[in-house]
Amino acid sequence: MSSIKIAFPTNGDLGLADELSEHFGHSSSFTVVSWNDDEKSVESVDILPNQAHEQGGCMMPVMMLKNQGVDVVVLGGIGMRPLMGFWEQGVSTYHGATGTVKDNLDMYVAGELSQLTESTCSHH
């Protein structure tokens, strides 16, 4: 069975119906979807609270997601330091679109999202 964990920065607890947050570090939560690629189905959806910047800087949420077994992050915006942290940890990063977690999950699975190669936030 081929399963991956995909994290989406969000601001609520609506699961697949939650909107993708525009800024990774300022999201209040992460919606983590376990996706079974063999079955083409969602195995589970978990909501994790974001860790405050004060508790370890920009790398705190990066390490929290890595420690939760996240393989991929789909996001709206991110600064260079946490982006590089994901790359160093072997977590793939994709630029999401405006819309829900479900919308972005569908686009990721269909191969319609581009992989991030640079920061998307100019204030970092």
Image (cartoon, rainbow, N blue to C red):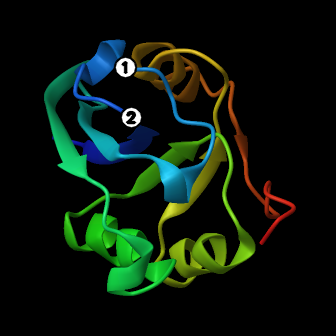
Q: Nearer the viewer, residue 86 or 10?
A: 10
Report helix, strand or loop for mark 2. Answer: loop
Residue at 58% across, 43% down: 75
How many marks on residues?
Answer: 2
How busy is the neighbourhood of tag 2: few (under 14 within 10 Å), some, or many (20 plus)? some
Q: Nearer the viewer, residue 89 or 110?
A: 89
Looking at the rendered image, the disc whose residue lies closer to the viewer, 2 or 1, is 2
Residue 37 percent location from the top left of the image = 31, 31
Q: Nearer the viewer, residue 93 or 19?
A: 19
Does 102 appear above or below 26? above
Q: What's under tag 1, amino acid-wise?
A: Asp
View extreme (front): residue: 54
Residue at 36% across, 46% down: 28
- Residue 18's tag is 1
Tag 2 near tag 1, CB within 8 Å: yes
56 horizontally vs 95: left or right? left
Q: What's under tag 2, amino acid-wise?
A: Asn
Q: Quadrant of residue 15?
A: top left
Residue 41 percent location from the top left of the image = 24, 18
Q: Nearer the viewer, residue 58 or 8?
A: 58
- Residue 11's tag is 2
| Upstream in sequence: badge 2 or badge 1 | 2
57 horizontally vs 36: left or right? right
Quarter holding the N terminus is top left
How busy is the neighbourhood of tag 1: few (under 14 within 10 Å), some, or many (20 plus)? many
Residue at 74% across, 54% down: 116
Q: Is residue 122 visible?
A: yes
Does 93 appear above or below 40? below
